[in-house]
Image: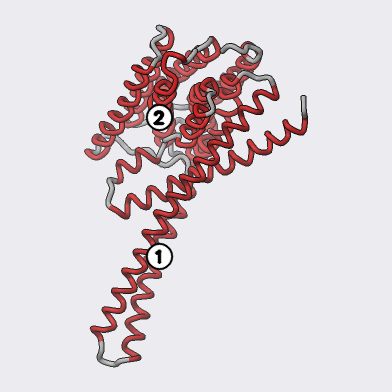
Amino acid sequence: MDWTILCFNGATFITALYLLEHGASKFIASTASLSTRIGVSETLVALLTAGAEWEELVVIVAALAQHRPSLALGNAVGASVSNILGAFGLGLLFQSGVAVYDRSARIYAAILFGVTSVVLVAALAHRLGRIFGGVAVVAFGLYIASVGWYIYKGVLAAPEDSDSDSDSDGEEERVEASREEERNERRRLLVDGDAEAVGDETLSQQSSGVEIARRRQRSLAAQIGGVLVGLIALSVAGYVTSTSAGNLADALHIPDSVFGATILAFVTTLPENLVAVLSGFRGHSGIMVANTAGSNIFLLTLCFGVILLATGENLEVGRGQVFGLVVTWASTAAFAIIVLCGGRRWMGIILIVVYIGYLVSMFVYFGGIDDL
């Protein structure tokens, strides 16, 4: 084993993950701000930015571009397991008392269980191909449209942002500060106009209006630039992350599917773990459910669909990946039961212990199998 190559790829992997998470946060915050500015539905923005695993999708696309479909599929399956057993389990562990979930949480849990069941049945029946991939992508579109409609009608509660919670707060503060600055500028221009030309109120108001318009144009350009910067950061980080992950897997002699389902999936879902801990500690149990369900629906429809459309019938789903899908289905069933019966701390402990067992099992039973 060449330790120089191993350390270099490890450092590159960690650096790329940092850029990946910050790029995703920048992209989501800027997209939400820009969408609000140009009048796009807040419901649509919430569904596309909150609880969505955009960084996972970027890594998956990059892995597919490098002809490593096992790494892409393993990452999607492993992230689905991590979101429930890891992130949701931590949220339960840090909550106080018994969490009682509302109707929206139950609906989200039911949708996720249905999606997970369909994916598992298709995998066991060897029906994962381009047709199923196309259906999965269409299903994601229908999910966005239907849930968005019901949120608009007030039936469901929209999920909150899981990747940029603090960035969203900062964005709101910046918007408010910009508005306050705009008001001060308007007052200053009016005062300056009165001082320079007493009685010329019309000219002062016109100058103020022109300055405000320029500020708005600059603000819009900055928001568009933020979206582009976030997108570029995501693309570069996704490519570097998938490349370094593949190199690490080769250097450590770990199959792509196992590395993607364990190490890569764990580190890319760290933001969800943090948000789950904060949500549980603050008593926001509904946020945990909506974000967990939304993230996994995103992974099992859009991300799975992209993988299958890119690989088609050439994708080999081996024993390790089937095992991961079975664990995903079982954890989703447990997730739905917890939502129906109420969440308690001891349930979180069980979920975390099971997740540790899942990681150990992947390495022990499938870590040395090349054909997964």
Percent x, y for residue 47?
A: 35, 38
- In the picture, the disc for residue 120 is none
Residue drawn at x 61%, y 30% is 245
The residue labelled by disc 2 is 298
Badge 1 marks a residue whose secondary structure is helix
Distance between the alpha carbons at the discs numbered 1 and 2: 34 Å
- Asked whether the viewer can see residue 347, the reply is no
Looking at the picture, tell me which residue is in the foreground, 24 or 50. 24
Q: Quadrant of the N terminus?
A: top right
Is 158 situated above or below 254? below
Amino acid type indicated by mark 2 = Phe
The quadrant of the image that shows the C terminus is: top right
Q: Amino acid at mark 1?
A: Ser
- Left or right: residue 200 versus residue 265 is left
Q: Which residue is mark 1?
A: 178
User: Which of disc 2 and disc 1 is earlier in sequence?
Assistant: 1
Residue at 68% over, 34% down: 10
Q: Residue at x 36, y 15 (%)?
A: 118
Q: Quadrant of residue 130?
A: top left
243 relative to 219, above or below:
above
Q: Nearer the viewer, residue 248 or 116?
A: 248
Measuring 26% from the left and 78% from the top, which residue is drawn there? Answer: 206
Q: Position of residue 289 (x, y in %)?
A: 41, 31
The answer to whether residue 360 is visible is yes
